[in-house]
Amino acid sequence: MLKPKEMSRAIIVGHKEIMEETIEALHGTNLFHLEDYNEDGSGLKLGRPFENAGEVSKKIVQLRSISSFLGVSKSDAPKQKESTVISDLDSKLDKLDAEVTEKTEQRSELESKLKELETLKKDLAPFSAIPIDMELYRNYENIAVFAGTVKEDVGPAISKVTSAYEMEYDQNTGTVVLFVKKEDEAKTSEVLSNFEYRELRVPDTTGKPQDLISGFAAEEANIQKQIDALETDMQSIKDKYSEFILASDEVLSIKSEKAEAPVKIATSEHTFIIDGWVPADSVSKLENIVNTATNGRAYVSVQEIEKKDTDIIPIEYDNPKVTRPFQEIMDLYARPKYKEIDPTALIFISFPLFYGMILGDIGYALILLTIAVAIKKLVNSDAVKPLMNVLIYCQISTLIFGILYAEFLGFPLASLHTDHGTIPGLIAGFETITLFTTPIAGEPITYPIHRTHLVMTMIIATALIGLLHINFGYILGFINENRNHGFVAAMLEKGSWIVVELGIALAVLGYTGIAPTQIIGIIVFLIGLVMLIKGEGAIAVIELPALLSNALSYTRLIAVGLSSIYIASTVNLIAFDMIWSQGGIVAAIGAILVFIFGHALNTVLSIIAPGLHALRLQYVEFFGKFYEGGGRKYNPFGYIRKYTEE
């Protein structure tokens, strides 16, 4: 906890004859983070894939192509024996490929016909009102045919240039079909150009357009019926082979990883060298497995980690199970570096705390808690479950603060006595108790805490929380710097900020007359400033005002919470006003709809706004004081089986 898992660098050396056994053993352990070898002129070369690599890759491509076409997705299929899958793989894959190919070709052919009919129908549409067989539009020696659209009837104009013509005109579409003698073609063309004539493509078919279009509809329906039947067949194939596809994909992926592994390994004519990382507490296990697999012919040596290797050490979290969902929050930002503090356990506390402090409503907590638990139960996804766990933690915190604030969907549960009278609460007899009066804001602190009547106190309290959180970050930064660069560097770069703050605090106490520390405060401040400039350079002086802005940033803990209360209160006010002022069943239904829709909207906002603002306080204000990140993810060579077992 608070630091990544300790890693060891291991080098495995052996004769090429046992390279396959060694890789097989390493893959089986799922412990060894394999480092890719880069040729460096030392004489060692990258290894070549095993002989079966090409065949395995070909089958993977074939299988995944079929899987993609059938739309097979990951599911909770039962595990199958690997030996059974391998023995059936070739015959089943060929049979499946043949079935899918046959259905695919049939569907492609039918879809092509469907497109042809669609195109033909589109071309025939302008001629639908023209009662002329399409065969009569072409193949004349002495007759010219014009088929197109015009802006208005061209009959009178054509009559002026020739009396020998036949014409059909559809005034709805502007389609005109005109037959004239060849010798009149030029004059006719000139007349048509005055009517914005646009030639239409005449489909190469026979029959009257309207009859053809009517026939197409029946033909299209028949083709679509055949396509639907093929889809049903495909679904049957998918149902029949899904488990086989998932299991085979897993088996082939494992084979492919092993077969391609030599291309990451350094080799000479007779030997191989595998470089990588393993958790320090698993070194003995790795040695035993490799020795057993190779009869002691491969040698595993643990290397001393040099300082220059620190940045490339793969990072594996080492946190208690309860905090692990927050590793997803860390991965959204960046994994810690090897020598850095891992703040996962810290945000496990502060993130839900800030979230609950912002939302703090029993009603919304119960709604979101129910949703999170339901999604976690219903959605079987490794990506969704950690996020739902984070949401559950946040809602538990929200529930606790909801009890502290005594709020339920924007309603105060306890009555409050003010200078303007008593504001009744939702629970009869639940009276607010005054505990004491704050010395700074002069506001009475009560139970429950009515946030809307303690605004100044809450602003001061949240700013103080910010100061504590920020300074905790500086302390963590001090620890990080001390680990990496020593005490002096830690003191100058991180400790100086705390000295500066201490100087400001003493000076303020002296200036306000609370304590005679004004001069001491100024001296301490100047010492801190000199340390800061020495540690981080002159630019650090420019960042001094950020101390105040960072602390004030935490006032969003009350500001965003108040916005949620006011939205909920407005929804309640509108809904109840509809009932009291208008009455009747219609108003009651409208009020219920407003109440449900309004609180549904605020529930969605209750996930987004508190979540984003609580996250921002971690990433920006807190992490900025100590955390760099950028560590490589520990990615062991191996495979976690889901659909097969050995």
Image: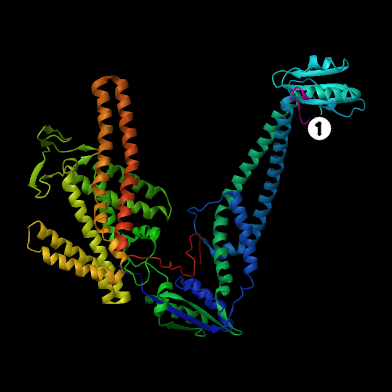
Figure quadrant of residue 603: top left
Q: Relative to residue 169, is residue 262 depicted above or below?
A: below
Q: Is residue 58 visible?
A: yes
Identify the residue shown where x is 15% and y is 38%. 414
For label 1, the residue is 204
**Left or right: where 294 falls relative to 171:** left
**Left or right: where 588 falls relative to 442:** right
Quadrant where the N terminus sits is bottom left
- How far across and how far down the image is residue 21, in percent? 54, 77
Identify the residue shown where x is 67% and y is 32%. 221
Q: Relative to residue 555, is residue 577 depicted above or below?
A: above
Figure quadrant of residue 522: bottom left
Q: Which residues are magenta?
A: 193-205
Q: Amino acid at mark 1?
A: Asp
**In the foreground, 21 or 185:** 185
- How far across and how far down the image is residue 56, in percent? 62, 65
Identify the residue shown where x is 74% and y is 32%. 120
- How far across and how far down the image is residue 36, in percent? 52, 73
